[in-house]
Image (cartoon, rainbow, N blue to C red):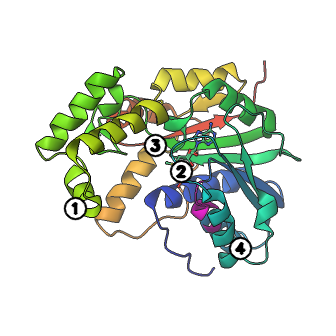
Amino acid sequence: MNQLPKAESITHQHILCVINTLIIQKNTKDTIRILDAGCGNGKLIAYLHICLHLLHSDKIFHISGYDVQDHGVQSEGFLVEAVNRLSTMIPAVNWAERINTIQTIDQWTFVTKKYDFIISNQVLEHVYDKDLFFSNISSNLIDGGHSVHLAPLKHVVHEGHIFLPWAHRIRNFSSLYGYIRFMSSIGFGKFRKHQKETGCSLNEYSERHADYIYFWTNYSSEAETIDFARRNGMRADFRFSFEFFTSKIRQILKIKRRNIYKPREYGFIDAILVKQLRYLSSVTLVCTKKNTY
Ligand SMILES: C[S@@+](CC[C@H](N)C(=O)[O-])C[C@H]1O[C@@H](n2cnc3c(N)ncnc32)[C@H](O)[C@@H]1O
């Protein structure tokens, strides 16, 4: 097998490992359909396309994505840029056909055939209507298919967008603004760096970032997240959360990367570990569309 390209982010490498593990564990079809929900700049799609074809030269991977156009996280035209980037990196595929745009309240009418895997990376904490999100996933997964979501839960201490502890726990706008302003004024978070780059004032920075957290994030707890999947007909657990954590440590210690994790049916140990890991980093939610009763 050829050497896999280096992942731009440890999150991409982790999602590849999870998908690869599940494919090897099931050892099923020749053509595998994957959808990246909230695909953003398309880099994860490109990485998965290249790596999965290298890892499984006997299989065909149809990887596509969609994102929402009415959410404030991304700047205008980001999906056009994603299509252009993908077309430059992998010209053999018609990416304009594979990257779809919808509104946040829409059903996934762009789907023509169900998926074996639906993935998302750092998306769940931004989704407002999670019932709709998981109902779309459940309706568009094949029976026995999996969805894999890497995202922080409400429990996490470090808010990864503005780099301030517990910022996402503050629901009252004025308190949030005051907290960001105070913490930034004493040197925490990204204000100093931001100010150097853009020249913005402390008030401007605090107001904009309070708006970001207030309007564009929506963290859920571990129990709420499981409930969204369950209500929409999917089994859910936090399998592979520990592996994400260890992958980060391996990266820091410069230990050789993995392409596969230890396969397993149940995430019992993970369920215990996630009770601690959820405070430290993103967790990996694995949903399975299966119900025997
Ligand atoms: C932090 S970005 C992550 C983008 C990409 N997955 C990545 O890893 O670079 C969060 C993404 O979630 C998307 N998003 C927000 N609400 C969504 C929803 N209801 N359905 C799908 N994507 C959504 C945003 O548009 C944005 O692209």
* Distance Cα–Cα, label 3 vs label 1: 36 Å
Upstream in the sequence, badge 4 or badge 3?
Answer: 4
Rendered residue at 53%/50% (across/down): 74
* Distance Cα–Cα, label 2 vs label 1: 22 Å
Given the image, on which type of amino acid does mark 1 rest?
Lys
Per the image, the residue denoted by label 4 is: 87
User: Mark 2 or 1, which is nearer the eye?
Assistant: 1
Given the image, on which type of amino acid does mark 4 rest?
Ser
Per the image, the residue denoted by label 1 is: 196
Q: Does mark 2 have its CB less than 8 Å from ligand 1?
A: yes
Is any atom of residue 20 visible in this view?
no
Rendered residue at 56%/25% (across/down): 226
Asked whether residue 227 is drawn in magenta, I would say no
Upstream in the sequence, badge 2 or badge 3?
Answer: 2
Q: Quadrant of residue 42?
A: bottom right
Upstream in the sequence, badge 2 or badge 1?
Answer: 2
Per the image, the residue denoted by label 2 is: 74
- Asked which secondary structure carries label 1, the reply is helix
* Distance Cα–Cα, label 4 vs label 3: 32 Å
* Distance Cα–Cα, label 2 vs label 3: 27 Å
Per the image, the residue denoted by label 3 is: 241
- Asked which secondary structure carries label 4, the reply is helix
User: Mark 3 or 1, which is nearer the eye?
Assistant: 1
